[in-house]
Image (cartoon, rainbow, N blue to C red):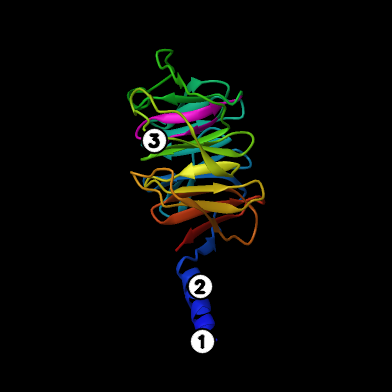
Protein backbone atom coordinates (compact mmCIF):
# COMPACT_ATOMS: atom_id res chain seq x y z
CA UNK A 1 0.00 0.00 0.00
CA UNK A 2 2.84 2.39 0.88
CA UNK A 3 4.63 1.56 -2.40
CA UNK A 4 1.48 2.38 -4.37
CA UNK A 5 1.09 5.67 -2.52
CA UNK A 6 4.73 6.52 -3.19
CA UNK A 7 4.31 5.86 -6.92
CA UNK A 8 1.18 8.03 -7.00
CA UNK A 9 3.06 10.80 -5.18
CA UNK A 10 5.91 10.67 -7.70
CA UNK A 11 3.46 10.87 -10.59
CA UNK A 12 1.74 13.86 -8.96
CA UNK A 13 5.04 15.65 -8.45
CA UNK A 14 6.05 14.99 -12.06
CA UNK A 15 2.72 16.34 -13.27
CA UNK A 16 3.18 19.47 -11.20
CA UNK A 17 6.78 20.01 -12.29
CA UNK A 18 5.86 19.73 -15.97
CA UNK A 19 2.68 21.82 -15.67
CA UNK A 20 2.19 25.04 -17.59
CA UNK A 21 0.92 28.16 -15.85
CA UNK A 22 -1.26 29.99 -18.38
CA UNK A 23 -2.52 33.56 -18.17
CA UNK A 24 -5.04 35.22 -20.47
CA UNK A 25 -3.66 38.06 -22.58
CA UNK A 26 -6.24 40.76 -21.89
CA UNK A 27 -4.97 43.66 -24.01
CA UNK A 28 -5.49 42.04 -27.43
CA UNK A 29 -8.54 40.19 -28.69
CA UNK A 30 -9.78 37.98 -31.51
CA UNK A 31 -6.38 36.79 -32.67
CA UNK A 32 -6.32 34.12 -35.34
CA UNK A 33 -2.56 33.57 -35.59
CA UNK A 34 0.59 34.43 -33.62
CA UNK A 35 4.33 33.90 -34.10
CA UNK A 36 7.28 34.37 -31.74
CA UNK A 37 11.01 34.33 -32.41
CA UNK A 38 14.25 35.93 -31.27
CA UNK A 39 12.45 37.55 -28.34
CA UNK A 40 9.84 39.19 -30.57
CA UNK A 41 6.13 38.48 -31.07
CA UNK A 42 3.82 39.30 -33.99
CA UNK A 43 0.18 38.41 -34.55
CA UNK A 44 -2.88 38.97 -36.72
CA UNK A 45 -6.49 39.24 -35.63
CA UNK A 46 -9.75 38.23 -37.27
CA UNK A 47 -9.93 41.67 -38.90
CA UNK A 48 -6.53 40.86 -40.45
CA UNK A 49 -4.79 43.68 -38.57
CA UNK A 50 -1.11 42.78 -37.99
CA UNK A 51 0.48 43.58 -34.61
CA UNK A 52 3.99 43.76 -33.19
CA UNK A 53 4.54 43.44 -29.43
CA UNK A 54 6.66 46.13 -27.77
CA UNK A 55 7.09 45.49 -24.06
CA UNK A 56 3.56 44.56 -23.00
CA UNK A 57 1.90 46.72 -25.67
CA UNK A 58 0.55 45.51 -29.00
CA UNK A 59 1.39 48.02 -31.74
CA UNK A 60 -0.61 47.77 -34.99
CA UNK A 61 1.46 47.53 -38.15
CA UNK A 62 0.32 48.97 -41.49
CA UNK A 63 -1.49 46.85 -44.02
CA UNK A 64 -3.79 43.85 -43.78
CA UNK A 65 -2.52 40.30 -43.28
CA UNK A 66 -4.02 36.88 -42.64
CA UNK A 67 -0.66 35.36 -41.64
CA UNK A 68 2.52 36.89 -40.20
CA UNK A 69 5.89 35.47 -39.12
CA UNK A 70 9.07 36.74 -37.48
CA UNK A 71 12.57 35.28 -37.26
CA UNK A 72 16.17 35.62 -38.47
CA UNK A 73 14.90 36.43 -41.98
CA UNK A 74 12.88 39.39 -40.67
CA UNK A 75 9.11 39.95 -40.66
CA UNK A 76 7.08 38.43 -43.49
CA UNK A 77 3.36 38.12 -44.06
CA UNK A 78 0.62 36.94 -46.40
CA UNK A 79 -2.52 38.95 -47.15
CA UNK A 80 -6.03 37.83 -48.11
CA UNK A 81 -5.05 38.02 -51.77
CA UNK A 82 -2.40 35.32 -51.07
CA UNK A 83 0.46 37.75 -51.75
CA UNK A 84 3.63 37.42 -49.67
CA UNK A 85 5.40 40.52 -48.34
CA UNK A 86 8.48 41.42 -46.34
CA UNK A 87 8.39 44.29 -43.82
CA UNK A 88 11.19 46.71 -44.66
CA UNK A 89 11.69 50.14 -43.06
CA UNK A 90 8.06 50.52 -42.03
CA UNK A 91 6.50 49.30 -45.26
CA UNK A 92 5.45 45.98 -46.79
CA UNK A 93 7.21 45.02 -50.02
CA UNK A 94 5.71 42.36 -52.28
CA UNK A 95 7.66 39.22 -53.07
CA UNK A 96 5.33 36.67 -54.71
CA UNK A 97 1.70 35.66 -55.23
CA UNK A 98 -0.42 32.54 -54.68
CA UNK A 99 1.10 31.87 -51.25
CA UNK A 100 -0.96 30.72 -48.25
CA UNK A 101 1.64 30.50 -45.46
CA UNK A 102 5.23 31.56 -44.76
CA UNK A 103 7.75 31.03 -41.95
CA UNK A 104 10.87 33.09 -41.12
CA UNK A 105 12.25 30.84 -38.37
CA UNK A 106 15.10 29.30 -40.35
CA UNK A 107 18.72 30.46 -40.25
CA UNK A 108 17.99 33.51 -42.38
CA UNK A 109 15.95 31.64 -44.98
CA UNK A 110 12.18 31.41 -45.33
CA UNK A 111 9.89 28.52 -46.23
CA UNK A 112 6.23 28.44 -47.10
CA UNK A 113 3.40 26.80 -48.96
CA UNK A 114 1.55 27.91 -52.08
CA UNK A 115 -2.19 27.67 -52.61
CA UNK A 116 -1.53 24.36 -54.40
CA UNK A 117 0.31 22.97 -51.32
CA UNK A 118 3.66 23.31 -53.06
CA UNK A 119 6.41 23.94 -50.45
CA UNK A 120 9.16 26.45 -51.28
CA UNK A 121 12.35 27.92 -49.78
CA UNK A 122 14.13 31.24 -50.29
CA UNK A 123 17.80 31.22 -49.24
CA UNK A 124 19.26 33.58 -46.64
CA UNK A 125 21.26 35.65 -49.13
CA UNK A 126 17.98 36.35 -50.96
CA UNK A 127 15.84 37.08 -47.89
CA UNK A 128 18.35 39.29 -46.08
CA UNK A 129 19.10 41.23 -49.26
CA UNK A 130 15.43 41.63 -50.13
CA UNK A 131 14.43 45.32 -50.14
CA UNK A 132 11.61 45.66 -52.63
CA UNK A 133 9.84 43.86 -55.46
CA UNK A 134 12.54 42.22 -57.54
CA UNK A 135 12.08 39.47 -60.12
CA UNK A 136 15.68 38.40 -59.40
CA UNK A 137 14.63 36.74 -56.12
CA UNK A 138 13.76 33.16 -57.01
CA UNK A 139 12.44 30.60 -54.54
CA UNK A 140 13.45 26.94 -54.62
CA UNK A 141 10.69 24.36 -55.02
CA UNK A 142 10.86 21.74 -52.26
CA UNK A 143 9.71 18.17 -52.63
CA UNK A 144 6.32 16.93 -51.50
CA UNK A 145 2.95 18.51 -50.85
CA UNK A 146 2.67 20.57 -47.65
CA UNK A 147 0.13 22.92 -46.11
CA UNK A 148 2.08 24.45 -43.20
CA UNK A 149 5.85 24.68 -42.63
CA UNK A 150 8.11 25.98 -39.87
CA UNK A 151 11.90 25.91 -39.42
CA UNK A 152 14.39 26.10 -36.59
CA UNK A 153 18.06 25.37 -35.88
CA UNK A 154 17.78 21.60 -36.45
CA UNK A 155 15.54 21.53 -39.51
CA UNK A 156 12.11 22.25 -40.94
CA UNK A 157 8.87 20.62 -39.83
CA UNK A 158 5.69 20.49 -41.91
CA UNK A 159 2.18 19.08 -42.07
CA UNK A 160 0.21 18.22 -45.19
CA UNK A 161 -3.52 18.54 -45.84
CA UNK A 162 -4.03 15.08 -44.28
CA UNK A 163 -2.43 16.29 -41.02
CA UNK A 164 0.59 14.02 -41.57
CA UNK A 165 3.86 15.30 -40.06
CA UNK A 166 7.24 15.53 -41.76
CA UNK A 167 10.78 16.68 -40.90
CA UNK A 168 13.45 17.98 -43.28
CA UNK A 169 16.88 18.20 -41.64
CA UNK A 170 20.20 19.53 -42.91
CA UNK A 171 18.71 22.43 -44.86
CA UNK A 172 21.40 24.64 -46.39
CA UNK A 173 20.59 28.22 -45.44
CA UNK A 174 21.92 29.67 -48.71
CA UNK A 175 20.90 27.08 -51.32
CA UNK A 176 17.99 25.36 -49.53
CA UNK A 177 19.53 22.00 -50.44
CA UNK A 178 18.38 19.23 -48.10
CA UNK A 179 18.04 15.47 -47.59
CA UNK A 180 14.30 15.34 -48.19
CA UNK A 181 11.32 14.76 -45.92
CA UNK A 182 11.12 12.06 -43.24
CA UNK A 183 7.69 11.01 -41.99
CA UNK A 184 7.09 11.54 -38.25
CA UNK A 185 4.43 9.73 -36.23
CA UNK A 186 1.30 11.59 -35.15
CA UNK A 187 -1.30 13.93 -36.64
CA UNK A 188 -1.24 17.75 -36.45
CA UNK A 189 -3.05 20.51 -38.32
CA UNK A 190 -0.34 23.14 -37.67
CA UNK A 191 3.21 23.05 -36.33
CA UNK A 192 5.75 25.63 -35.13
CA UNK A 193 9.48 25.39 -34.41
CA UNK A 194 11.05 27.72 -31.84
CA UNK A 195 14.40 29.50 -32.05
CA UNK A 196 15.88 26.90 -29.67
CA UNK A 197 14.57 23.97 -31.75
CA UNK A 198 11.52 23.17 -29.61
CA UNK A 199 8.52 21.94 -31.60
CA UNK A 200 4.86 22.52 -30.76
CA UNK A 201 1.70 21.81 -32.70
CA UNK A 202 -2.09 21.66 -32.61
CA UNK A 203 -4.26 18.83 -33.90
CA UNK A 204 -7.69 19.05 -35.53
CA UNK A 205 -9.38 18.63 -32.13
CA UNK A 206 -7.59 21.68 -30.73
CA UNK A 207 -5.18 19.72 -28.53
CA UNK A 208 -1.65 21.11 -28.09
CA UNK A 209 1.41 18.86 -28.29
CA UNK A 210 5.17 19.26 -27.88
CA UNK A 211 7.90 17.04 -29.30
CA UNK A 212 10.21 15.47 -26.71
CA UNK A 213 13.91 14.66 -26.95
CA UNK A 214 14.92 17.02 -29.76
CA UNK A 215 18.68 17.61 -30.01
CA UNK A 216 21.12 18.58 -32.75
CA UNK A 217 22.08 14.91 -33.11
CA UNK A 218 18.47 13.71 -32.94
CA UNK A 219 16.38 16.44 -34.63
CA UNK A 220 13.36 14.12 -34.94
CA UNK A 221 13.07 13.79 -31.16
CA UNK A 222 11.61 10.80 -29.34
CA UNK A 223 7.84 11.29 -29.06
CA UNK A 224 4.91 13.62 -28.42
CA UNK A 225 3.59 14.92 -25.09
CA UNK A 226 0.26 16.68 -24.69
CA UNK A 227 0.19 20.19 -23.23
CA UNK A 228 -3.10 20.30 -21.29
CA UNK A 229 -5.45 23.15 -22.24
CA UNK A 230 -8.96 23.68 -20.91
CA UNK A 231 -10.34 24.88 -24.25
CA UNK A 232 -9.61 23.86 -27.87
CA UNK A 233 -6.74 25.76 -29.48
CA UNK A 234 -6.06 26.62 -33.09
CA UNK A 235 -2.56 28.13 -33.09
CA UNK A 236 0.61 27.89 -30.99
CA UNK A 237 4.11 29.37 -30.93
CA UNK A 238 7.00 29.25 -28.44
CA UNK A 239 10.02 31.42 -27.66
CA UNK A 240 12.25 32.12 -24.66
CA UNK A 241 10.24 29.98 -22.24
CA UNK A 242 6.87 31.40 -23.24
CA UNK A 243 4.20 29.37 -24.98
CA UNK A 244 1.64 31.51 -26.82
CA UNK A 245 -1.66 29.84 -27.71
CA UNK A 246 -4.75 31.09 -29.51
CA UNK A 247 -8.10 29.40 -28.96
CA UNK A 248 -10.70 28.67 -31.60
CA UNK A 249 -12.76 31.49 -30.08
CA UNK A 250 -9.90 34.00 -30.44
CA UNK A 251 -8.76 34.00 -26.80
CA UNK A 252 -5.00 34.36 -26.41
CA UNK A 253 -2.96 32.94 -23.53
CA UNK A 254 0.72 32.97 -22.63
CA UNK A 255 2.02 30.03 -20.61
CA UNK A 256 5.18 29.40 -18.59
CA UNK A 257 6.49 26.33 -16.82
Residue 144 spot, x, y in % from top left: 54, 26
Query: Which is in the foreground here, disc 1 or disc 3?
Result: 1
**Residue bearing the label numbered 2:** 11
Decide if residue 221 is in sight here.
yes
Q: Around disc 2, counting alpha carbons within 10 Å, would you say few (fewer than 14), some (14 to 19), or many (20 or more)?
A: few
Q: Which residues are magenta?
A: 101-115
**Residue 159 position by quadrant:** top right
Using the numbered discs, state the Cα–Cα distance from disc 1 to disc 3 in whole angstroms.
51 Å
Vertical relation: 25 (above or below) 49? below
Query: Which is in the foreground here, disc 2 or disc 3?
Result: 2
N-term-proximal mark, 1 vs 3 = 1
**Residue bearing the label numbered 1:** 2
Residue 3 spot, x, y in % from top left: 50, 83
Of residues 116 and 180, the one drawn nearer to the viewer in this rendering = 180
Residue 248 spot, x, y in % from top left: 66, 50
**Residue bearing the label numbered 3:** 106
Decide if residue 44 is in sight here.
no
The residue positioned 38% from the left and 26% from the top of the image is 127
Q: Residue furthest bottom?
A: 2
Amino acid sequence: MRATAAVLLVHCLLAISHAWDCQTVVDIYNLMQIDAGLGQVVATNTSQIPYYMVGDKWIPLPGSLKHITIGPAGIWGVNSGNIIFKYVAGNWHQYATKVKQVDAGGAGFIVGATMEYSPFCLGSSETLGFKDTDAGHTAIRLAGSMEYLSCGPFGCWAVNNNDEIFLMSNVNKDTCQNKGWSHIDGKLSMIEVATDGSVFGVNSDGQVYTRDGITASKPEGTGWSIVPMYIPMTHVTYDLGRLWVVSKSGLTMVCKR
